[in-house]
Amino acid sequence: MSTPLLTVSHLEKSYQKTHILHDISFDLDAGEVLTLLGPSGSGKSTLLRCLNGLEAFQAGTLTFAGEVITQKAKQWQQLRQQIGMVFQSYDLFPNRTVLENILLGPLKVQKRSRETVLPEVEKLLQQVGMRDYRDAYPRQLSGGQKQRIAIVRALALKPRLMLFDEVTASLDPEMVRDVLTIIRQLADTHQMTMLVVTHEMDFAQQISDQVLFLADGRIQEQTPGPQFFKRPQTSRAQNFLASMDF
Amino acid sequence: MAHSGIDVLTMGSNFWRLLGGLWITIRIALVASIIGILLGSLLGILRTLPNRPLRVVLRLYLEFFRIVPTVVLLFLFYYILPKQFNLNLPANQVATLVFALWVAAEMSDIVRGALQSVSTHQREAGQAIGLNYWQLQRYVLIPQAWPLCLPATVNLLTRVVKTTSLLMLISVMDVINIGQQIIEANNKTDPNGVFWIYGIIFLFYFLINYPLSRWAKHLTQHQLEATHL
Ligand SMILES: Nc1ncnc2c1ncn2[C@@H]1O[C@H](COP(=O)(O)OP(=O)(O)OP(=O)(O)O)[C@@H](O)[C@H]1O
Ligand SMILES: [Mg+2]
């Protein structure tokens, strides 16, 4: 067995006095899709942000590709090129065109040449059906289009792990499917390793290799995807699925 | 001939002397503004760092220049610096220095406010693609903050221009000081000259500041519309 791409062990996170995450431990193998489910306020976003250095944690260790993460700013800057993150609110840079948004990381952070990056980016844009929008500004795009560009912006750095935090939560229903399809393709055809937070249960069922069920800042259960949706191990997870009309 | 006093303006080189004074006023305002805006922008960026002692020091600097009236600052620098520090600067340079430090202080607050009003989401999106601190400033925060700074900065410039009227107090040969001299020299023959001189000075200041304040208004309006899109 090869070593996992990401290992989280005994992670503890608090804001000032409130303890948010308790003793979080799990492994994520390369090519695997892990879905993080749980009620609102259970700490899903906080956990994802810890894995990308947007939040510091107080105890525990993160190991990414065999390297222990020391939480130094320099190291996070390096790691973020390998750990992409997409947010609920897309957060494209409003003053830059679609192409400029996407190229910023590869050109300025990775210092790659425009000639080598451009063909890759065009291919990605093609895959998400946004090839004709490379010179548009974010304000000219719909929510679903913005989110597709935000995904391409993260992928352009060629990450080894992608973190998705409720990326369809602020989209109109008819746009949700397009974005979810893109994420599914990423898993199916590109074997991208992913950690996904979502409220779309059908999508979660289709995509999950493993489900991590979180409540009150603790992992309640970790269960293979198909099994979780048929027969969750804990009653809290059962109630949660019932509350999601699943 | 009963004269209205307008010949005070046309007499000899009076008008040209006034223009010369105006040039000195403008030059001080301009040089001080440029230095002040550059220095203040840097200080504004530094004030967003999570370094507490640095923030306190820069905050004190701002409050000092905000609380102490400009007249007092001018006197302080003009009369006390040479005595205490043996630093003898010509009045023009003292004036430029004081104004530049004042503009820098005000500017640092404008820039800090604008940078902090760029949403945390933008900051985090930039961090998430691996930008380091200065790249984040340069590619994400500053380009979004600077349009927010513009109206306040232009407003500050109009205040600078207006405040230059204090320069005569430390004997800078600015437009008002020269006007005063002309008035005094012609007081006997032309008692009405004072109206014309101050009239023309009023016109000068108006011509500079009116476009500036219109511009500031326009920018503010523009911004309101942009944020309500
Ligand atoms: N910056 C913060 N300071 C203090 N408490 C915070 C902060 N951010 C989040 N929290 C708290 O941490 C807990 C977990 O929040 P988190 O956003 O991770 O939940 P979540 O599972 O993502 O919820 P949702 O499904 O609503 O997005 C909540 O109780 C929240 O109030
Ligand atoms: Mg959340």
Image (cartoon, rainbow, N blue to C red):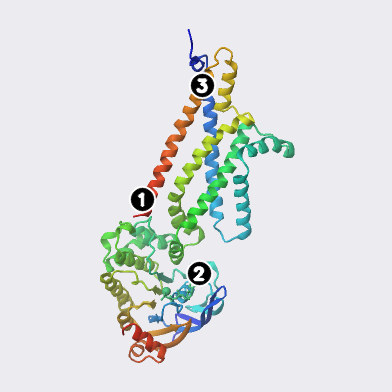
* Residue A34 versus residue B172 in the image, above or below: below
Say if labels 2 and 1 share a chain.
no
The chain under label 3 reads B
Label of residue A76 in the image: 2
Outermost residue to the top = B1
Q: Residue B12: horizontal and vertical position, in percent?
A: 52, 14
Which chain is home to disc 1?
Answer: B
Q: Quadrant of residue B87?
A: top right
The residue under label 3 is B195
Which amino acid type corresponds to the residue marked 3 in the rendered image?
Answer: Phe
Residue under label 1:
B225
Q: Position of residue B85 (x, y in %)?
A: 72, 39
**Residue at disc 2, secondary structure:** helix
- The amino acid sitting under disc 2 is Trp
B124 relative position to B48: left or right: left
Q: Is mark 2 within 8 Å of ligand 1?
A: no
Spatial CA span between label 2 and label 3:
69 Å
Considering only vertical position in the picture, is B193 above or below B86? above
Q: Which is nearer the eye, B18 or B196?
A: B196
- Indicate the quadrant where residue A180 lies: bottom left
